[in-house]
Image (cartoon, rainbow, N blue to C red):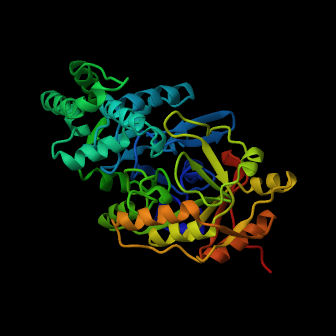
Amino acid sequence: MMEPFEDRDVVVVDLGFGDAGKGATVDWLCSDQADLDVAAVVRFNGGAQAAHNVTVGERHHTFSQFGSGTLSGAPTFLSRFVLVEPIALAREARALEALGVRNPFDLIRIDARALLTTPIHVAANRAREDARGGNRHGSCGKGIGETAAYALEVANAPTVGDCLRPDSLRRKLSALATFHDPMIAESRHGFPPIDDMVDMYTEFAAVVDITGPDALGAIGADGRLVFEGAQGVLLDEWRGFHPHTTWSTVEPSNARAMIDQLGRDSYVLGVTRTYMTRHGAGPFPTEDPALAKVLPEEHNGTGEYQGEFRIGHLDELLLRYAIEVSGGVDGLALTHLDAMDRGLTAGIPIHGVQEYEGWRSLPVGQWKDLDHQQALTDALQAVAVVPKGIPTDREGFAGYLGQEMGVPVVLTADGPDRADRREWSPVPA
């Protein structure tokens, strides 16, 4: 068992723009290699737009709503902070069955208070992004923002619990369709008839365990909980660079609150690559198209709504910012160490950032101050980067990063497979 975690629940959070390796980290934590006696993986933000890649030998799966510990048999709990899309969940269950997971729906429980993402939300999301033309925000096109925004504007938004109440669900879906009709009617997008959706969600409610507010305590009584975040802190709805953000609290405050409510202790594990990546529009000071050519991504490509997958050098200012707005982290999981060798071999070694011209750190504003976040976005779009050299060997870089961030590296990965992950501690001097 990994000594740093002791008896604490583990919160896994991405310290970048996403795609740092959260899923593979969660998979390892739930495996026999970590020996942590995990009772369940708890999703604490996001929705069906998550894409957490896990590779175990010949098996590969991109986790969306099921927790990334599923291949090790760890159950999933979708908390009230998750936006649940049943159609996508059913597709994912079939894909897991094909990989040998028996009865995947037996491994999942869902808080009845979780918001329901429907084909209506998806159609509205895509219609809105189409209307933005060249000013797209970088949406995944899966209805996440529309689900969250509608719930903020309308008190009676559909929830997973409504799948147990067909008449109530029908009224709520009808109201949702009326609300979005002006936008969807002018677009190329549509959605199934309301009655068909009600029938589908009623069938969904018959095969999943929809729980009350006290379920997490009972689940946690069986062992350690691993809280799996989605997206990255730099995309956080309040701390990311507006408007290129997600409609979700990515930093770990919601996970910490759930753990505190259970009277337990938390260990926040921040995940970062050895370099930076970003999917779609938004500021990216260290982006380097030449580096992208030598670090291709097998499981991350260009999406119709997300846009292209972008790659750049390590940005220590953004990493420090992510740690700060997360309220600090207890340890780092450092992934893609093999990229250091590949960049060096190709003659494009990964470098760090001494400062942005005139900046040595990013100013942290008040929570929910979107004017401040917009100002950061504007500044980052035009900032000049002052690069600096960093250790190019794996051991040296892991030690360097832990020292620079003031947070120990406790887990490293030098490839995509579960077998490529290992506990890490500095080599004695």
Looking at the picture, tell me which residue is in the foreground, 190 or 252.
190
Looking at the picture, tell me which residue is in the foreground, 226 or 202.
202
Residue 255 is situated, as x and y percent measured from the top left of the image, at 38, 60
Residue 29 is situated, as x and y percent measured from the top left of the image, at 56, 54
Q: Residue at x 76, y 53 (%)?
A: 338
In this rendering, the count of numbered labels is 0
Vertical placement of residue 188 versus 49, above or below: above
Q: Residue at x 59, y 48 (%)?
A: 24
Vertical placement of residue 151 versus 373, above or below: above
Vertical placement of residue 317 versus 159, above or below: below
Note whether residue 212 is visible. Answer: no
Quadrant of the snapshot with the C terminus: bottom right
In the shown orientation, is residue 406 left or right of residue 211?
Answer: right
State the residue lying farthest toward the bottom.
429
Quadrant of the snapshot with the N terminus: bottom right
Residue 114 is situated, as x and y percent measured from the top left of the image, at 28, 45
Note whether residue 351 is visible. Answer: yes
Image-quadrant location for residue 260 = bottom left
Looking at the picture, tell me which residue is in the foreground, 83 or 139.
139
In the shown orientation, is residue 370 left or right of residue 429?
Answer: left
Residue 204 is situated, as x and y percent measured from the top left of the image, at 30, 28
Q: Residue at x 33, y 61 (%)?
A: 258
In the shown orientation, is residue 237 left or right of residue 346?
Answer: left
Q: Residue at x 32, y 41 (%)?
A: 146
Image-quadrant location for residue 369 = bottom left
Looking at the picture, tell me which residue is in the foreground, 71 or 315.
315
